[in-house]
Image: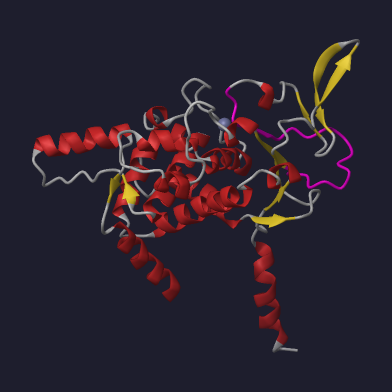
Amino acid sequence: MQLHAPLAVAFSLPFLTTAAKTYYVDNSCTEKPGWSTYITETMTMAKRTSERLESKTDTDFEAVFKRLFQTGKSGDDYNYVKKTMDDIASWTSTTSLKESDIRIFCDQDKRWEEKKVKGVIKGWFDPINNMVSQIQPSCLKEGINGRTYSRLAKGDHKDHNKNRVAISICDVTFDPTQIIEVPLHIEDAVEKGDITEDGEFKFLSVLVSHTILHEMAHAADKDIKDLPDKETAYGWEEVIKKDSREASRNADNYAFLGLAAILADKGYSLPRINPNDPEDVRKEAEKKAEEGSLTFLIDHTKRALGMLTRAFRG
Ligand SMILES: [Zn+2]
């Protein structure tokens, strides 16, 4: 009996930590050409961000982090970002809609029903997830890439997970423009030619994974919003202007950090600002970094590999 006591402790420990969340993907998404590439890329963004933030030698990624979040790798706001990315990176897929924490739909919000009282629309109801919305579901509005819903219908949860959040990825995300051909995933972007032209960071927010990770950040934590308003929440130029508190609570900052992580895996990052360079060289590099220009860094991948080797050593 004595032998069993330490074992009992050992086996009960894992249950003290919160179980990793699960996500369910609706058929409306899996039917989209390229979906598995997009969702894999999104989860890779979260995982590589977590790993790169843990590295002590990945100074290029640290510089991108500082530019996006206006803080170094310590303190409350850093911990908040790290915790959120670790959370998303730990999500596993499930085929059980009702048990899932996060549900992803690509149905152009068609599941929502209008709730009318005497002919007047009083709100919307999603019978699949048993959720309500007082504002019109977004996919039919112009210029909306996705939306995250978290208001549960009152009363009977019909066996649903009580912490459920539903994400809609709108059709426009998969087909952003009819005018020019844009890359939809990272390999596509790298193959389509010069990735180091000015403002590429800004441009690559068209990747489908960028939108999915943006919505996942909302879904991970209800305090992560589009801040301070719809006009200035999105895009490279806007996200780098926020202070650390606002940046760490703004979904698009997470999407750009994830994008930086997978670009780094391809050897790309912002230009390095070398304090030993002459002032004019530093100013030019700073200007390019502010614009979100990418540079191919020959020793970048090596640094990341060094980090991975250490991870395997435990
Ligand atoms: Zn958002």
Identity of the residue drawn at 34% across and 39% down: 67
Residue 310, visible in the rendered structure: yes
Q: Position of residue 74 (x, y in %)?
A: 38, 49
Specify the quarter for ligand 1. Answer: top right
Give the magenta part as a residue range.
143-164
Q: Position of residue 279 (x, y in %)?
A: 10, 36
State the quadrant of the C terminus.
bottom left
State the quadrant of the N terminus.
bottom right
Residue 260, visible in the rendered structure: no
Q: Position of residue 155 (x, y in %)?
A: 88, 35
214 left or right of 289?
Answer: right
128 left or right of 266?
Answer: right
- The front one of 56 and 26 is 26
264 left or right of 276?
Answer: right
224 w.r.t. 49: above or below: above
Q: Main secondary structure of the magenta part?
A: loop
- The front one of 179 and 241 is 179
- Report the residue that reaches farthest toward the left: 278
Identity of the residue drawn at 48% across and 34% down: 181
Q: Was residue 129 drawn as part of the magenta stretch in this picture?
A: no
239 w.r.t. 257: above or below: above
- The front one of 166 and 181 is 181
Residue 18 falls in which quadrant of the image?
bottom right
Q: Position of residue 55 (x, y in %)?
A: 37, 60
Residue 138 falls in which quadrant of the image?
top right
- The front one of 281 and 296 is 296
Identity of the residue drawn at 50% across and 45% down: 185
